[in-house]
Image (cartoon, helix red, strand yellow):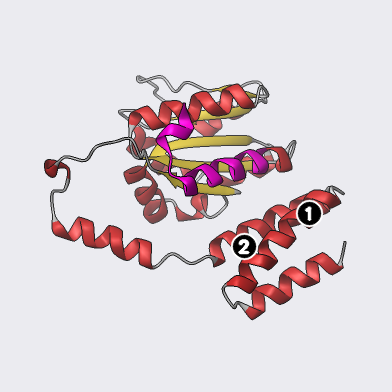
Amino acid sequence: MINSLLTPSDQIKLKELNQTIIALEDLPSLIMLGADTENLSHQLQKYILKNHSEIKNFKVKENIKDKNIIQTICSKKKEYRLINIFNHKNKKEIIKFLNYSRDYIFEETLQLIFIFDNKAIKIIKQDAYDFFSRNNFFHNFTDHSYKFKQSDIKHNDELDNKISSYKSYSPKRDISQFINIGLEAFNTSKYDTALEYFEKSLKLAKDNGFLYESSISLGNIGNI
């Protein structure tokens, strides 16, 4: 079902998400997913829970008083948690606390997957960047089945910002992600997985002519 909503490039990212979940296994981890429609957010949630039985859904109540949900999770049984706050009415308040909670993830060995709407992701990057920067995997998924109406495009500057954001994309982000996963796998003696991700980072670096990143990837491969 979910593949019918996604572009081929997003389908590849979905596979990478699965690989990341498996590679990190029992390690502390933060995965952040964006979705542009409520339907896609639910389909992502359904897909992850179905394919990874170790992950449990953490439903955030609408009337929750303590907006520091990571602290709330710490007080409960330690499980791999998926938190979908795409449509939560208090998500802005929840986001405010994320920046002050990033260290809990590693101190308490938490494993968290967040699903946000794409606008919330922008807010997190601006107001909770320290939290965002600790992610092990991030991707904004787009519902390819959604039919845009003329009224959806409110201002030309919004469209210009989206185009500018697309043009400013750098594959260095993906290279860094592959290297980080490879290092996590290497440090836990999962050498086959480490080699797989170091080779991915090397290929992407070579394809884009990044000499420094190529040398880092080669050096990591040489350590295996």
- Main secondary structure of the magenta stretch: helix
User: Badge 2: how crowded within 10 Å, few (<14), some, or many (20+)?
Assistant: some
User: Badge 1: how crowded within 10 Å, few (<14), some, or many (20+)?
Assistant: many
Q: Is residue 17 magenta?
A: yes
* SS type, badge 2: helix
Q: Confirm whether residue 99 shows in the render.
A: no
Q: Confirm whether residue 183 shows in the render.
A: yes
Name which of mark 1 and mark 2 comes first in the sequence.
Answer: 2
- State the residue position of label 1: 194
The residue lying toward the viewer, choosing from 8 and 219, is: 8
Q: Is residue 142 left or right of residue 208?
A: left
Depicted 83 relative to depicted 27: above or below:
above
- State the residue position of label 2: 176
Depicted 16 relative to depicted 60: above or below:
below
Amino acid on which disc 2 is placed:
Ser
- Image location of residue 70, percent across then percent down: 53, 33
Q: CA distance from mark 1 to mark 2?
A: 13 Å
* SS type, badge 1: helix
Q: Magenta part of the protein: which range?
A: 1-21
Depicted 75 relative to depicted 180: above or below:
above
Q: Is residue 51 left or right of residue 24?
A: left
